Amino acid sequence: MTSLKVAETLKELRHHRGFTQKQLSEQLHISRQAYSNYENGTRLPDLETACVIADYFQISLDQLVRVGLHPEKPADPFASLPKDMQDFLSDYHCLPDEKQKRVQSYTQFLRDR
């Protein structure tokens, strides 16, 4: 999975700069074949090469390897709940801490009955 994020990120960065694989590999001082393997996801760059690539594009290693240039929003943990429950939880999270504690106490009271 990581190699796919590296490949996707490298391809996007290269296209954004308007380079061919050959031009970019020359800029990075690596062979075109090695760069092509990174971009196709068949190989991962070693740490030193990954650092060179990240420095060249002025991105973090995390962006290059894990999250990419456009991190996805985390999945909504409440998405599978019924709409009324989603609304309740949304309202609950908007309450001040003291009122959330009162709701929790009342829920506990109802459960214990």
Image (tube, rainbow, N blue to C red):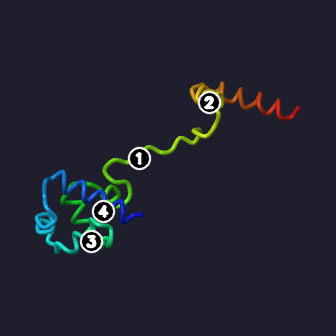
Left or right: 20 as drawn, with respect to 46: left
Mark 2 vs mark 1, CA separation in Å? 23 Å
Q: Earlier in the sequence, mark 3 or mark 4?
A: 4
Quarter-of-image position of residue 98: top right
Mark 4 vs mark 2, CA separation in Å? 38 Å
Which residue is pictured at 33% across the width and 55% down the height? 63
Mark 2 vs mark 3, CA separation in Å? 46 Å
Q: Circle 4: is it few (<14), some (14-19), or many (20+) Cα within 10 Å?
A: many
Q: How many marks do you count on the picture?
A: 4
Asked which secondary structure carries label 1, the reply is loop
Mark 3 vs mark 1, CA separation in Å? 25 Å
Asked which secondary structure carries label 2, the reply is helix
Q: Circle 1: is it few (<14), some (14-19), or many (20+) Cα within 10 Å?
A: few
Residue at the spot of label 2: 83
In this view, the mark in front (3 or 1): 3
Say which of 12 and 100 sits in front. 12
Left or right: 49 as drawn, with respect to 111: left
Which residue is pictured at 18% across the width and 51% down the height? 16
* Residue 87 on image: x %, y %: 61, 27
Residue flagged by tag 4: what amino acid is it? Ala
Residue flagged by tag 2: what amino acid is it? Lys
Q: Are marks 2 and 3 in contact (CB under 8 Å)?
A: no
Residue at the spot of label 1: 72
Residue at the spot of label 4: 7
Q: Earlier in the sequence, mark 2 or mark 1?
A: 1
Q: Is residue 84 above or below residue 73?
A: above
Residue at the spot of label 3: 37
Q: Are marks 3 and 1 in contact (CB under 8 Å)?
A: no
